[in-house]
Image: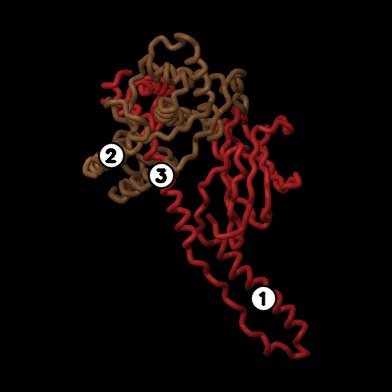
Chain colours: A red, B brown
Amino acid sequence: MDHQLAERTGAADRYLLNEFSAEERAEFEAHYFDCVVCASNVREGSIFIDSVKALMERETEDAARDEPHVEPRRPAAWFAWLRPATLTPSLVALSLAMIVGYQNLLTLPSLRTPQLLSTSVIAPLTREAAPIVTIDPRLPRFNLNFMLDAPRANSSYVCQFMDERGAAILTMESGLREVSSFTLSFLLLTSQFPPGRYTLSVRDPANRSLVVQQYNFVIRVGAAK
Amino acid sequence: MLLAANPIGCEAGGPALNYAERRQRGTLERYVFDRQYLERLAGGDAEVERHFAAYFGELLLVKLRGRLRSPQVVADLRQETFVRVFHALRKKDAIQHPERLGGFVNSVCEHVLLEYFRSGKRTVQMQEDATEPIDRSHSVESELITEERTQLVKRVMSELPEADRKLLREVFLEERNKDQLCEELKIDRNYLRVRVHRAIERFRLSIQSKGKLSRAAKAAG
């Protein structure tokens, strides 16, 4: 590929948009490593795309954090029910009413309320400290995303979450995948992941002792980020 | 040797200034890749090393991220590429055509990638006689550059029509399938590329204007 062809065909933008075949990609890379103008186009385009992604992620997180919190309605006064003759059945009725009321006022609305999911992705074990995931304890579920880059494609993967003692707390199948590089996304129960350190092991279902990839992360509670 | 990769931007030609002067201008002028450049690089000239890392560091990052998902593997393979290039430079006449140093760096990176995919290893094996890495990656200058870029991009984004902003979000943040997106928006892939190109061009013009403003301010000051 020569520079005129690269300019005429908008090669830098097509490259950054992943529109090249493997051969075209190799050809353009061989060109831009020697061409100042095309290298500059690729560099600046890449900077722009990275910055746009970072800015938009920040906007999404800010919007999620600024969502108003609805205070639960307080139960009505029940002093009129405190008569000996009716105390026991009243207490039973009251308990049932409180359970149903809690579900209707807190749990179910929070399940029905639209929720922005985190787009942060956790990379496999790195030299840096385990990433900290902040979850909102008011929400019954939270999401985690993991970047998987396996040496070969498996038909599926077994995913096992362990706490810091090494005890397995959740095991799931990934479902049919047949690819080696993708993002694993989970929607998890907040109650199942109290604050602490965790590990996710992704294993080959045909040989569960073989760990394909492993991730460490730390759960903290607070305003969701 | 681990080199910092803090690219600022390149302009072709111009006299060879020292790194501090070029940094004040907000640009990193391109050296000519000749025999002298290679000798200075092999000899450990700090200025030339910084330029080399700045110029090729981000190009390698873009190339490797297009093939690999893991940032750690990308960092490792980029480092391995630098190590092997430096190892080659120290051999007499290893690089026959200095003006094609870029092509050489790209070829080395291709070999490193092929080895990684064939071996399926989780770590990259450094050469036995590789020199000890020196981490120059974090500096106040690099932090300033990142914030500067962010502010430029923010301004460019605020000047874009809402439809273009939405398109950039769907293409780059949500990584939506482009064919599906084009079908929804009733546009073809060429037009999608045009709209993305428009946004990137505004950013490039912003960088260039900023460079010119800095030079004008410097000259007036």
* Residue A47, position as x, y percentages in the image: 39, 38
Q: Is residue A89 left or right of residue A35?
A: right
Compute the Cα span from label 1 to label 2: 69 Å
Say if A30 sits above or below A214 in the image: above
* Mark 1 or 2: the one toward you: 2
The mark nearer the N terminus, 2 or 3, is 3
Task: State which chain disc 3 sits on.
Answer: B
- Residue type at tag 3: Leu
Residue B104 at x, y percent in the picture: 43, 17
Mark 1: few/some/many CA within 10 Å (<14, 14-19, 20+): few
Q: Quadrant of residue A110?
A: bottom right
Query: Is residue B129 toward the left or the right of residue A60 in the image?
Result: right
Secondary structure, mark 2, is helix
Tell me the quarter of the image containing the N terminus of chain A.
Answer: top left
Could you tell me the amino acid type at mark 1? Ala
Q: Do the dots labelled 1 and 2 sit on one chain?
A: no
Residue at mark 3: B144
Where's residue B125, x and y in %?
Answer: 61, 22
Q: Nearer the viewer, residue A136 or B56?
A: B56
**Residue denoted by label 1:** A97
Label 3, label 1: how far apart the Cα atoms are: 59 Å
Kindly indicate whether the residue at mark 1 contacts the one at mark 3 (C-beta within 8 angstroms).
Answer: no
Residue that appears at 60% across and 18% down: B129
Residue A11 visible in the picture: no
Disc marking residue B211: 2
Q: Nearer the viewer, residue B213 or B171?
A: B213
